[in-house]
Amino acid sequence: MFQRIITSGLAFVAIAFTPVYAEDPGSPQDLTKKLAGIWEIEEGVNQGVELSGEELDGTTMVIKGKTIVNYDRDQNETYRATFTLDTSTKPIQIDMIAQMKGVPPANALGILKFDESDEFEICYALPGADRPADFKSPVGSKIMLFECEKED
């Protein structure tokens, strides 16, 4: 009997202290709809070097359907890619194929997560590098990290 109480108590402790994960993102189609819109790029790290507020001021990411387009403050297109999502993984995986004029298509593998319903982080490897395992962009890496907030 004492053994059963201890076992039951341990099971309760394990359940009580199991970490709570963010809401299930649903299907890739659901997440694609959630991503749709205009996002302001709030913070960024380029291969371990933090981008200044001046560099990021006015930069946006527009997501429509399965296309991501980044614009600088003067609304010049700086990056365009089509993407697919795998919501069955933690973190969510994103595979992008650059679709820029004059540049051959190139794959960029990444991960993303929502911090809140109107904020997300995307971390991806430049073409030829492995998909990042976490949301970091170490110095000397070929990893990009951006924090984005949805515009009203």
Image (cartoon, helix red, strand yellow):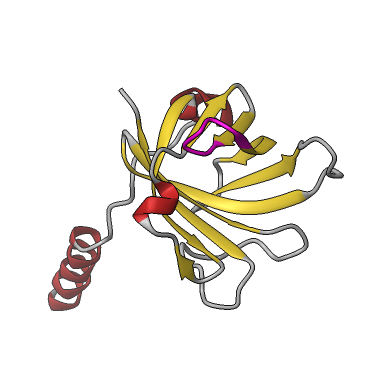
> Viewed as shown, does residue 144 lie left or right of 152?
right
The image quadrant where one finds the N terminus is bottom left
Q: Residue at x 83, y 43 (%)?
A: 105
Highlighted range, magenta: 71-77
Q: Main secondary structure of the magenta part?
A: loop
**Residue placed most toward the observer, 141 or 79:** 79
Q: Is residue 29 above or below residue 127?
A: above
**Residue placed most toward the observer, 79 or 141:** 79
| Magenta region includes residue 80 | no
In percent of width and height, residue 128 lies at: 78, 62
Q: Is residue 55 above or below residue 12?
A: above
| Magenta region includes residue 72 | yes
**Residue placed most toward the observer, 47 or 77:** 77
**Residue placed most toward the observer, 79 or 19:** 79
> Viewed as shown, does residue 52 lie left or right of 61?
left
In percent of width and height, residue 38 lies at: 44, 27
In percent of width and height, residue 149 lies at: 35, 38
Q: Residue at x 49, y 65 (%)?
A: 134
Q: Residue at x 16, y 75 (%)?
A: 6
The image quadrant where one finds the C terminus is top left
In percent of width and height, residue 133 lies at: 55, 65
Q: Is residue 131 above or below residue 85?
A: below
Q: Residue at x 54, y 41 (%)?
A: 87
